Image (cartoon, rainbow, N blue to C red):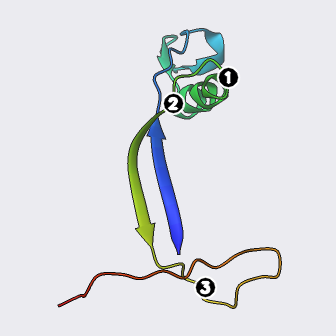
Amino acid sequence: MRRIIYEDTYVTVPVTREVLRDEEDGSARIDFEKLVAAATVISQDPAAEWITEEVQVEAHPIQQPTPDDRKSLAGEFPSLD
């Protein structure tokens, strides 16, 4: 099985030259890729407040025997009728 946890956090990226691109007309616009790269760096700060948004459990696409250093949970489940 595989569990995927989606989390979100809010960050504020200062609009500086590092996240702008120059236009031919002399103006500057936000470069979205640079903005996202900066947000990604800021989000790694331990002070970022990550909140679980969603948890999904699904069958792992690679099925294999349990590795020697792992345990397999054997349990009972309710009737699927």
Which kind of residue does numbered mark 1 sit on? Pro
Considering every residue shown, the one lying at the far right of the view is 68
Q: In which quarter of the image is the C terminus?
A: bottom left
Residue indicated by mark 2:
50
* Proximity of marks 1 and 2: CB atoms separated by less than 8 Å: no
Task: Tell me the crowding category of disc 3: few under 14, some 14 to 19, or many 20 or more residues within 10 angstroms, Cα based.
Answer: few
Sequence-first tag of 3 and 2: 2
Task: Tell me the crowding category of disc 1: few under 14, some 14 to 19, or many 20 or more residues within 10 angstroms, Cα based.
Answer: few
Which kind of residue does numbered mark 2 sit on? Trp
The correct choice, above or below, for 61 with respect to 48 in the image is below
Q: Is mark 2 on a helix, strand or loop?
A: loop
Q: Distance between the residues labelled 1 and 3?
A: 33 Å
Q: Which label belongs to residue 46?
A: 1
Q: Quadrant of residue 36?
A: top right
Considering every residue shown, the one lying at the far left of the view is 81
Q: How far apart are marks 1 and 2 (CA)?
A: 9 Å
Return the x and y of residue 70 as percentages of the image width and height.
Answer: 75, 74
Return the x and y of residue 5 as percentages of the image width and height.
Answer: 49, 51
Q: What element carries label 1?
A: loop
Q: What element carries label 3?
A: loop
Which kind of residue does numbered mark 3 sit on? Ile
Q: Nearer the viewer, residue 20 or 80?
A: 80
Q: Which of 73 and 66 is in front in this view?
A: 73
Q: Which of 41 and 15 is in front in this view?
A: 41
Task: Tell me the crowding category of disc 2: few under 14, some 14 to 19, or many 20 or more residues within 10 angstroms, Cα based.
Answer: few
Q: Residue at position x 62%, y 17% from top?
A: 47
